[in-house]
Protein backbone atom coordinates (compact mmCIF):
# COMPACT_ATOMS: atom_id res chain seq x y z
CA UNK A 1 0.00 0.00 0.00
CA UNK A 2 2.23 2.80 -1.19
CA UNK A 3 -0.34 5.59 -1.27
CA UNK A 4 -1.72 7.30 -4.38
CA UNK A 5 0.64 5.97 -7.02
CA UNK A 6 0.36 2.42 -5.67
CA UNK A 7 -3.42 2.19 -5.69
CA UNK A 8 -5.03 4.74 -7.92
CA UNK A 9 -2.85 4.70 -11.05
CA UNK A 10 -3.92 8.19 -12.10
CA UNK A 11 -0.42 9.44 -12.99
CA UNK A 12 0.98 6.27 -14.54
CA UNK A 13 -0.56 3.36 -16.49
CA UNK A 14 -1.96 0.41 -14.58
CA UNK A 15 0.21 -2.67 -15.25
CA UNK A 16 -2.83 -4.81 -16.15
CA UNK A 17 -4.70 -2.44 -18.49
CA UNK A 18 -1.73 -0.46 -19.83
CA UNK A 19 -3.65 2.80 -19.35
CA UNK A 20 -4.27 5.09 -16.38
CA UNK A 21 -7.48 4.49 -14.46
CA UNK A 22 -8.51 8.04 -15.39
CA UNK A 23 -8.31 7.17 -19.09
CA UNK A 24 -10.19 3.92 -18.53
CA UNK A 25 -12.87 5.93 -16.73
CA UNK A 26 -13.32 8.60 -19.39
CA UNK A 27 -13.61 5.93 -22.11
CA UNK A 28 -16.29 4.08 -20.11
CA UNK A 29 -18.15 7.38 -19.85
CA UNK A 30 -17.74 8.03 -23.59
CA UNK A 31 -19.05 4.52 -24.35
CA UNK A 32 -22.18 5.43 -22.37
CA UNK A 33 -22.37 8.66 -24.37
CA UNK A 34 -22.29 6.65 -27.61
CA UNK A 35 -25.43 4.90 -26.35
CA UNK A 36 -27.07 8.18 -25.25
CA UNK A 37 -26.64 9.89 -28.62
CA UNK A 38 -27.00 6.57 -30.49
CA UNK A 39 -30.42 6.06 -28.93
CA UNK A 40 -31.51 9.56 -29.93
CA UNK A 41 -30.12 9.12 -33.44
CA UNK A 42 -32.13 5.94 -33.89
CA UNK A 43 -35.17 7.80 -32.50
CA UNK A 44 -34.61 10.42 -35.20
CA UNK A 45 -34.51 7.74 -37.93
CA UNK A 46 -37.64 6.08 -36.52
CA UNK A 47 -39.53 9.40 -36.37
CA UNK A 48 -38.45 10.35 -39.87
CA UNK A 49 -39.41 6.98 -41.37
CA UNK A 50 -42.79 7.08 -39.63
CA UNK A 51 -43.62 10.67 -40.63
CA UNK A 52 -46.03 11.32 -43.50
CA UNK A 53 -43.83 14.24 -44.60
CA UNK A 54 -40.47 15.53 -43.40
CA UNK A 55 -39.15 19.05 -44.01
CA UNK A 56 -35.79 19.47 -45.73
CA UNK A 57 -33.39 20.80 -43.11
CA UNK A 58 -31.73 23.26 -45.47
CA UNK A 59 -35.12 24.83 -46.27
CA UNK A 60 -35.96 25.76 -42.68
CA UNK A 61 -32.59 25.86 -40.89
CA UNK A 62 -29.66 28.21 -41.39
CA UNK A 63 -27.00 26.16 -43.23
CA UNK A 64 -24.31 28.94 -43.40
CA UNK A 65 -24.51 29.46 -39.61
CA UNK A 66 -24.32 25.70 -38.98
CA UNK A 67 -21.35 25.43 -41.38
CA UNK A 68 -19.65 28.23 -39.43
CA UNK A 69 -20.35 26.33 -36.20
CA UNK A 70 -18.90 23.15 -37.71
CA UNK A 71 -15.69 25.03 -38.57
CA UNK A 72 -15.63 26.53 -35.05
CA UNK A 73 -15.87 23.10 -33.39
CA UNK A 74 -13.29 21.52 -35.70
CA UNK A 75 -10.88 24.37 -34.95
CA UNK A 76 -11.54 24.02 -31.21
CA UNK A 77 -10.70 20.31 -31.44
CA UNK A 78 -7.32 21.23 -32.93
CA UNK A 79 -6.61 23.86 -30.26
CA UNK A 80 -7.65 21.34 -27.57
CA UNK A 81 -5.25 18.67 -28.83
CA UNK A 82 -2.56 21.39 -29.21
CA UNK A 83 -3.01 22.32 -25.54
CA UNK A 84 -2.28 18.69 -24.66
CA UNK A 85 0.71 18.60 -27.04
CA UNK A 86 2.02 21.82 -25.44
CA UNK A 87 2.00 20.12 -22.03
CA UNK A 88 3.82 17.14 -23.55
CA UNK A 89 6.48 19.66 -24.67
CA UNK A 90 6.47 21.15 -21.12
CA UNK A 91 5.32 24.51 -22.48
CA UNK A 92 2.76 25.62 -19.90
CA UNK A 93 2.32 29.12 -21.40
CA UNK A 94 1.35 27.67 -24.75
CA UNK A 95 -0.99 25.23 -23.00
CA UNK A 96 -2.86 28.13 -21.39
CA UNK A 97 -3.06 29.99 -24.69
CA UNK A 98 -4.48 27.00 -26.61
CA UNK A 99 -6.86 26.14 -23.77
CA UNK A 100 -8.14 29.74 -23.65
CA UNK A 101 -8.74 29.69 -27.42
CA UNK A 102 -10.56 26.33 -27.08
CA UNK A 103 -12.87 27.83 -24.44
CA UNK A 104 -13.51 30.96 -26.53
CA UNK A 105 -14.34 28.82 -29.58
CA UNK A 106 -16.74 26.75 -27.46
CA UNK A 107 -18.44 29.97 -26.32
CA UNK A 108 -18.56 31.20 -29.94
CA UNK A 109 -20.33 27.95 -30.90
CA UNK A 110 -22.95 28.53 -28.19
CA UNK A 111 -23.45 32.19 -29.22
CA UNK A 112 -24.07 31.15 -32.86
CA UNK A 113 -26.41 28.39 -31.66
CA UNK A 114 -28.15 30.97 -29.46
CA UNK A 115 -28.77 33.18 -32.52
CA UNK A 116 -30.23 30.19 -34.36
CA UNK A 117 -32.53 29.31 -31.46
CA UNK A 118 -33.60 32.95 -31.00
CA UNK A 119 -34.50 33.17 -34.69
CA UNK A 120 -36.58 30.00 -34.41
CA UNK A 121 -38.39 31.20 -31.28
CA UNK A 122 -39.12 34.57 -32.95
CA UNK A 123 -41.01 32.66 -35.62
CA UNK A 124 -42.73 30.56 -32.95
CA UNK A 125 -40.90 27.43 -34.00
CA UNK A 126 -40.59 25.41 -30.80
CA UNK A 127 -40.21 21.72 -29.94
CA UNK A 128 -44.02 21.42 -29.93
CA UNK A 129 -44.36 22.80 -33.49
CA UNK A 130 -43.80 19.44 -35.20
CA UNK A 131 -41.81 16.21 -34.94
CA UNK A 132 -38.86 17.69 -36.87
CA UNK A 133 -38.45 20.59 -34.44
CA UNK A 134 -38.97 18.24 -31.47
CA UNK A 135 -36.02 16.03 -32.42
CA UNK A 136 -34.00 19.04 -33.71
CA UNK A 137 -34.23 20.84 -30.36
CA UNK A 138 -33.66 17.61 -28.40
CA UNK A 139 -30.51 16.66 -30.30
CA UNK A 140 -28.98 20.15 -30.63
CA UNK A 141 -30.06 21.08 -27.08
CA UNK A 142 -28.43 18.01 -25.55
CA UNK A 143 -25.34 18.61 -27.69
CA UNK A 144 -25.27 22.28 -26.63
CA UNK A 145 -25.39 21.21 -22.96
CA UNK A 146 -22.40 18.97 -23.65
CA UNK A 147 -20.51 21.93 -25.16
CA UNK A 148 -21.39 23.98 -22.06
CA UNK A 149 -20.16 21.16 -19.79
CA UNK A 150 -16.88 20.98 -21.72
CA UNK A 151 -16.42 24.75 -21.43
CA UNK A 152 -16.91 24.59 -17.65
CA UNK A 153 -14.41 21.73 -17.23
CA UNK A 154 -11.87 23.40 -19.54
CA UNK A 155 -12.23 26.70 -17.67
CA UNK A 156 -11.53 24.87 -14.43
CA UNK A 157 -8.37 23.39 -15.96
CA UNK A 158 -7.33 26.80 -17.33
CA UNK A 159 -7.49 28.51 -13.93
CA UNK A 160 -7.70 26.74 -10.50
CA UNK A 161 -7.21 23.20 -11.84
CA UNK A 162 -3.90 24.09 -13.51
CA UNK A 163 -2.16 24.31 -10.11
CA UNK A 164 -1.78 20.52 -10.40
CA UNK A 165 0.76 21.01 -13.23
CA UNK A 166 3.43 21.97 -10.68
CA UNK A 167 2.52 19.20 -8.22
CA UNK A 168 2.06 16.28 -10.62
CA UNK A 169 2.55 17.10 -14.32
CA UNK A 170 1.74 13.51 -15.43
CA UNK A 171 -1.60 13.51 -13.63
CA UNK A 172 -2.42 16.97 -15.00
CA UNK A 173 -1.58 15.85 -18.54
CA UNK A 174 -3.86 12.86 -18.02
CA UNK A 175 -6.66 15.20 -17.00
CA UNK A 176 -6.18 17.39 -20.06
CA UNK A 177 -6.11 14.29 -22.27
CA UNK A 178 -9.39 13.09 -20.69
CA UNK A 179 -10.98 16.55 -21.09
CA UNK A 180 -9.75 16.49 -24.69
CA UNK A 181 -11.23 13.05 -25.38
CA UNK A 182 -14.59 14.36 -24.15
CA UNK A 183 -14.28 17.54 -26.24
CA UNK A 184 -13.39 15.59 -29.40
CA UNK A 185 -16.36 13.31 -28.79
CA UNK A 186 -18.66 16.35 -28.63
CA UNK A 187 -17.11 17.48 -31.94
CA UNK A 188 -17.65 13.99 -33.37
CA UNK A 189 -21.37 14.05 -32.45
CA UNK A 190 -21.76 17.42 -34.19
CA UNK A 191 -20.08 16.00 -37.32
CA UNK A 192 -23.11 13.68 -37.61
CA UNK A 193 -25.75 16.13 -36.35
CA UNK A 194 -24.81 18.76 -38.94
CA UNK A 195 -25.56 16.77 -42.15
CA UNK A 196 -28.43 14.79 -40.60
CA UNK A 197 -30.38 17.82 -39.35
CA UNK A 198 -29.29 20.60 -41.71
CA UNK A 199 -28.43 19.04 -45.06
CA UNK A 200 -30.73 16.03 -45.54
CA UNK B 1 -0.08 8.64 -24.59
CA UNK B 2 2.57 9.35 -22.00
CA UNK B 3 6.34 9.48 -22.20
CA UNK B 4 6.62 11.07 -25.65
CA UNK B 5 9.81 12.53 -27.03
CA UNK B 6 9.67 16.12 -28.34
CA UNK B 7 10.29 14.75 -31.86
CA UNK B 8 7.25 12.50 -31.58
CA UNK B 9 5.09 15.39 -30.39
CA UNK B 10 6.26 17.66 -33.24
CA UNK B 11 5.38 14.84 -35.63
CA UNK B 12 1.93 14.55 -33.99
CA UNK B 13 1.37 18.30 -34.35
CA UNK B 14 2.04 18.08 -38.09
CA UNK B 15 -0.57 15.32 -38.35
CA UNK B 16 -3.09 17.40 -36.34
CA UNK B 17 -2.73 20.30 -38.80
CA UNK B 18 -3.24 17.96 -41.77
CA UNK B 19 -6.30 16.37 -40.13
CA UNK B 20 -7.70 19.86 -39.53
CA UNK B 21 -7.24 20.74 -43.22
CA UNK B 22 -8.94 17.48 -44.24
CA UNK B 23 -11.87 18.10 -41.85
CA UNK B 24 -12.34 21.65 -43.17
CA UNK B 25 -12.20 20.45 -46.79
CA UNK B 26 -14.70 17.64 -46.11
CA UNK B 27 -17.06 20.12 -44.40
CA UNK B 28 -17.00 22.32 -47.52
CA UNK B 29 -17.51 19.20 -49.66
CA UNK B 30 -20.53 17.95 -47.70
CA UNK B 31 -22.19 21.39 -47.85
CA UNK B 32 -21.34 21.67 -51.57
CA UNK B 33 -22.84 18.24 -52.34
CA UNK B 34 -26.05 19.21 -50.51
CA UNK B 35 -26.59 22.00 -53.09
CA UNK B 36 -26.51 19.50 -55.98
CA UNK B 37 -29.87 18.09 -54.85
CA UNK B 38 -29.14 14.38 -55.32
CA UNK B 39 -32.01 11.87 -54.93
CA UNK B 40 -32.81 11.47 -51.19
CA UNK B 41 -31.23 8.03 -50.78
CA UNK B 42 -28.01 9.04 -52.59
CA UNK B 43 -27.83 12.30 -50.60
CA UNK B 44 -28.15 10.39 -47.30
CA UNK B 45 -25.46 7.88 -48.30
CA UNK B 46 -23.01 10.58 -49.48
CA UNK B 47 -23.58 12.76 -46.38
CA UNK B 48 -23.18 9.82 -43.98
CA UNK B 49 -20.11 8.58 -45.87
CA UNK B 50 -18.40 11.98 -45.54
CA UNK B 51 -19.46 12.26 -41.87
CA UNK B 52 -18.04 8.79 -41.20
CA UNK B 53 -14.69 9.74 -42.74
CA UNK B 54 -14.61 12.98 -40.71
CA UNK B 55 -15.49 11.26 -37.44
CA UNK B 56 -12.94 8.51 -38.12
CA UNK B 57 -10.25 11.17 -38.57
CA UNK B 58 -11.22 12.80 -35.27
CA UNK B 59 -11.32 9.45 -33.43
CA UNK B 60 -8.12 8.08 -34.96
CA UNK B 61 -5.89 11.14 -34.59
CA UNK B 62 -7.34 13.66 -32.10
CA UNK B 63 -8.58 10.90 -29.77
CA UNK B 64 -5.48 8.78 -30.48
CA UNK B 65 -7.58 5.69 -31.22
CA UNK B 66 -5.27 4.76 -34.11
CA UNK B 67 -2.65 3.90 -31.51
CA UNK B 68 -4.45 2.95 -28.31
CA UNK B 69 -4.33 0.08 -25.83
CA UNK B 70 -6.55 -2.93 -26.53
CA UNK B 71 -8.70 -2.44 -23.45
CA UNK B 72 -10.06 0.85 -24.85
CA UNK B 73 -11.27 -0.95 -27.99
CA UNK B 74 -12.96 -3.58 -25.80
CA UNK B 75 -14.78 -0.84 -23.88
CA UNK B 76 -16.01 0.81 -27.09
CA UNK B 77 -16.94 -2.38 -28.90
CA UNK B 78 -20.14 -3.18 -26.91
CA UNK B 79 -21.37 0.44 -27.21
CA UNK B 80 -20.87 0.47 -30.97
CA UNK B 81 -22.32 -3.05 -31.29
CA UNK B 82 -25.46 -2.11 -29.33
CA UNK B 83 -25.86 1.03 -31.45
CA UNK B 84 -25.72 -1.15 -34.58
CA UNK B 85 -28.31 -3.50 -33.00
CA UNK B 86 -30.57 -0.45 -32.52
CA UNK B 87 -30.19 0.45 -36.19
CA UNK B 88 -30.94 -3.14 -37.27
CA UNK B 89 -34.04 -3.22 -35.04
CA UNK B 90 -35.25 0.00 -36.64
CA UNK B 91 -34.85 -1.37 -40.14
CA UNK B 92 -37.06 -4.33 -39.17
CA UNK B 93 -39.79 -2.23 -37.61
Image (spheres, rainbow, N blue to C red):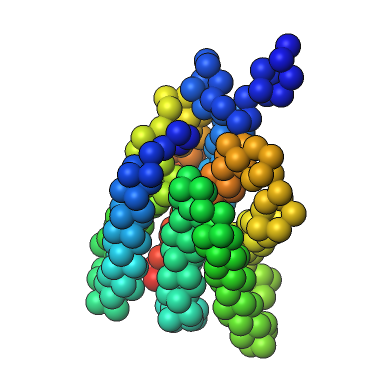
Q: Quadrant of the rendered structure where residue B50 is?
A: bottom left
- Quadrant of the rendered image containing residue B34: bottom left
Residue in the picture at 66% in, 44% down: A166
- Image quadrant in which the C terminus of chain A is located: bottom left
Give how far across and how far down residue B45 sits, in percent: 29, 57
Q: Does any portion of residue A153 appear in the rendered image?
A: no
Tell me: A48 left or right of A30: left
Instruction: Tell me if residue B1 can be seen.
Output: yes
Q: Quadrant of residue A195?
A: bottom left
Depth check, front residue: B4 or B17: B4
Judge from the rendering whether residue B65 lies leftward or rightward of residue A28; answer left or right: left
Q: Position of residue A76 (x, y in %)?
A: 49, 63
Q: Is residue B11 left or right of residue A146?
A: left
Q: Is residue B34 left or right of residue A144?
A: left
Image point 74% across, 54% down: which residue?
A160
Residue appearing at x 60%, y 40% in the figure: A169
Give above or below for A1 relative to A124: above
Furthest residue in direction bottom, as rendered:
A122
- How many tags in the picture? 0
* Front in this rendered view, residue B25 or B81: B25
Q: Position of residue A66 (x, y in %)?
A: 47, 74
- With respect to residue A151, does A165 lie above or below? above
Q: Residue furthest top?
A: A1
Amino acid sequence: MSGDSGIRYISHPHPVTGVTNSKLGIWCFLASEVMLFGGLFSAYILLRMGAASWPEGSAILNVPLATLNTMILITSSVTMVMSWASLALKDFKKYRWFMAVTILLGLAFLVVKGFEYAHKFEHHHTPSTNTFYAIYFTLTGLHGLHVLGGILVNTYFLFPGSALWKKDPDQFMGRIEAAGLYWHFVDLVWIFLFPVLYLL
Amino acid sequence: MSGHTPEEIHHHVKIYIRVFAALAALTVLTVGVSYIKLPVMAAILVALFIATIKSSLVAAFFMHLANEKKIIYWILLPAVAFFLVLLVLISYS
